[in-house]
Amino acid sequence: MIKAIVFDCFGVVITDVFRAMHDELRSRDPQTADKIDGLVDELNRGTLPRPDFMNRVSVLFGISTDELRTRVESTEAKNKAVFEYILELRKHYKTAMLTNLSPEGFGRRFTQEEMNTYFDAVVLSGEIGYIKPEPEAYEITAEKLGVQLNECVMVDDRQICITGAEAVGMQGVLYDNLQQFKADLAKLIA
C-alpha cells in the first residue's frame, strides 16, 4: 500500500534550464559534460562551495559566471500545477521532496512556509551527504516520513534516479509532464 509520494525538485516542481544547457553540451562534447556532472555531484553533496562551482562550470560552458547565473536564474520557474496537485495528494498521502540540492540553493528557491504547506519532509543531499541514486538518500527520506521504502513512490525526471529508488524497494514514476504523471501515479495507487 502506497503511503507517501516523494518528489524531485528540478524537472518536476521547478523547470530545469541547467539540465537543458548540460544536455546540449553533452551532444557536442561528452567529456566536458562528464566534468560538469562531477562538479554537480560535489556541489550537491555539499563538498564544493557554490561560488567555486559557478566559476568552474561557467568555464566549462564557455560563458561568464554572470551569464550562467542569469540564464539559469531568470528562466527557472515553479510548476504551479504540480504544487496544486501535491496539495490534493497531501489529503491522502505523506509527501516529501528529495533533491540533489544544497541547503543554500534550496533556500534561494523556497521559503520554509512553502515547504510546510506542500511537504511532510524535505531531504537535501547537501545536508545528508548522499545524492540520488545512492540508496541512503531514499532510505533517509522514507525514515523521515515514517514509512517503509515499499510504501513510497519516487517521482523524478531522470531514469537513473527512478532506477535507484526501485533498487531499494520504492515504486517509481518517470516525470515528463503533469498529465502523464497523474495517469502513471493513478495506476500505482489504484
Image (cartoon, rainbow, N blue to C red):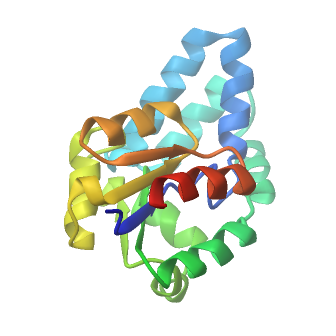
Quarter of the image where one finds residue 68: top right
Going 34% across and 44% down the picture, which residue do you hit? 131
Is residue 144 visible in the rendered image? The answer is yes
Q: How many marks?
A: 0
Quadrant assignment for the N terminus: bottom left
Is residue 129 visible in the rendered image? The answer is no
Indicate left or right for 141 with 48 as reference: left
Indicate left or right for 145 with 103 as reference: left
Quarter of the image where one finds residue 74: bottom right
Q: Position of residue 112 (x, y in %)?
A: 47, 84
Indicate left or right for 113 with 76 as reference: left
Going 54% across and 32% down the picture, which residue do you hit? 56
Quarter of the image where one finds residue 143: bottom left
Going 54% across and 52% down the picture, which residue do you hit? 187
The furthest residue to the front: 190
Q: Position of residue 134 (x, y in %)?
A: 28, 38
147 versus 34 height, above or below = below
Q: Position of residue 165 (x, y in %)?
A: 34, 42
Q: Please state which of residues 186 and 155 is positioned toward the viewer in this rendering.
A: 186
Q: Please state which of residues 106 and 164 is positioned toward the viewer in this rendering.
A: 164
Q: Please state which of residues 139 and 172 is positioned toward the viewer in this rendering.
A: 172
Q: Position of residue 3 (x, y in %)?
A: 34, 69
Going 73% across and 45% down the picture, which residue do you hit? 17
